Amino acid sequence: MILLTGGAGYIGSHTCVELQEANYDIVIADNLSNSHIESIDRIYEITGKRPAFYDTDLLDGEGLNAIFEENQIEAVIHFGGLKAVGESVAEPLKYYRNNIAGTVNLLEVMKQHNVKNLVFSSSATVYGDPHSVPIQEHFALTATNPYGRTKLMIEEMLKDLYHADPEWSISILRYFNPVGAHESGLIGEDPNGIPNNLFPFIAQVAIGSRSCLHIFGDDYPTADGTGVRDYIHVMDLANGHVKALEKNLYSTGTDAYNLGTGIGYSVLQMVRAFEKVNQVGIPYKVMSRRQGDIAECYADSSKANSELNWYATRGISQMCRDAWNWQVKNPSGYKSHAFS
């Protein structure tokens, strides 16, 4: 069985679908602080298989231990963690306690049960403001906020763990900008409060639940002045976890992989694409830059192509179409219970 921490969340739920369709048995541990129990029902509706679920916090060592005692866990995909950059700046101790201490708890329980196969959900934030693009895995690592530093610290922790015990098999996946939803519209991105990411904000404006999109900065040294990012369909990202898990199962070591498309799109390009694909209008207002934002960030994913046999196959039109399909079917997110 494969344990997914944070498996009821946006990326975790889509990865659960991919794993179950590849015939893996799944256990999810999630405290539901930024996810929804409804996603478990939706996973069952898509795949016909219901993953085992534990409402467990990573800071609860006894709760984690019970999961390993009650299930034959072979590997862990670790999504669990807080992820809002702005909140991390305002409440750094909350992020260090939850993300760092929670991961230490998880690794200690894994070690105790001799489970040494881990796929870790990292982030392109570990590159800080890169000196050039596309970004390669060997670039210098830094971070500009506490959230990014927790990812970077965990990466260093995992490298130390492998050096101390070479039986570990660890894949570190550095995500770029996940967007879209499962093509069924049953699962998708449902952020709490005001979205931190571009796509759910665009979709909420399009559906009418927000009046206009705020674009932070139009004076960057890019083609249209807005920030350029590497947007990757969440199902391509989910498939990357399956590929990393497959590699881990027959090898040891620790390695990091970028998961992105290698194509940079500006904020305005994404707004225009969303409008065109879905025949909707997105009113927007340009605001001043946000502290810590950078001009360009996109991936060189050739290492994942060659070593994991992973490729991003879904383009910008499908990202826009699937994100809107989810929003239309779930105008208030999982609270809509559109399929109940």
Image: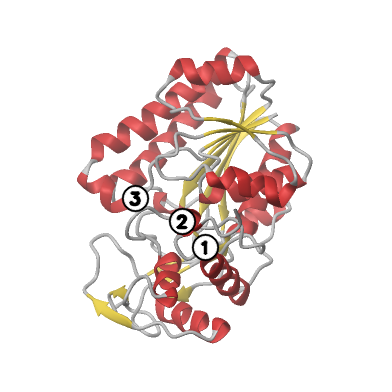
- Tell me the kind of residue under disc 2: Asp
Given contact means CB atoms under 8 Å apart, are the residues at marks 3 and 2 in contact? no
> Does residue 241 show up?
no
Q: Which element carries disc 1, helix, strand or loop?
A: loop
Given contact means CB atoms under 8 Å apart, are the residues at marks 1 and 3 in contact? no
Quadrant in the picture for residue 291:
bottom left
Label 2 or label 1, whichever comes before in sequence order: 2
Quadrant in the picture for residue 112:
top right
- Tell me the kind of residue under disc 3: Ala
Task: Identify the residue position indicated by label 3 in the image.
Answer: 84
Q: CA distance from mark 3 to mark 2?
A: 14 Å
Q: Which element carries disc 2, helix, strand or loop?
A: loop
The quadrant of the image that shows the N terminus is top right
Given contact means CB atoms under 8 Å apart, are the residues at marks 2 and 1 in contact? yes
Task: Identify the residue position indicated by label 1 in the image.
Answer: 330
Q: Position of residue 41 (x, y in %)?
A: 62, 45
Task: Identify the residue position indicated by label 2 in the image.
Answer: 190
Q: Residue at x 37, y 85 (%)?
A: 224
Circle 3 or circle 2, nearest the eye: 2
Q: CA distance from mark 1 to mark 3?
A: 23 Å
Label 1 or label 3, whichever comes before in sequence order: 3
- Tell me the kind of residue under disc 1: Asn
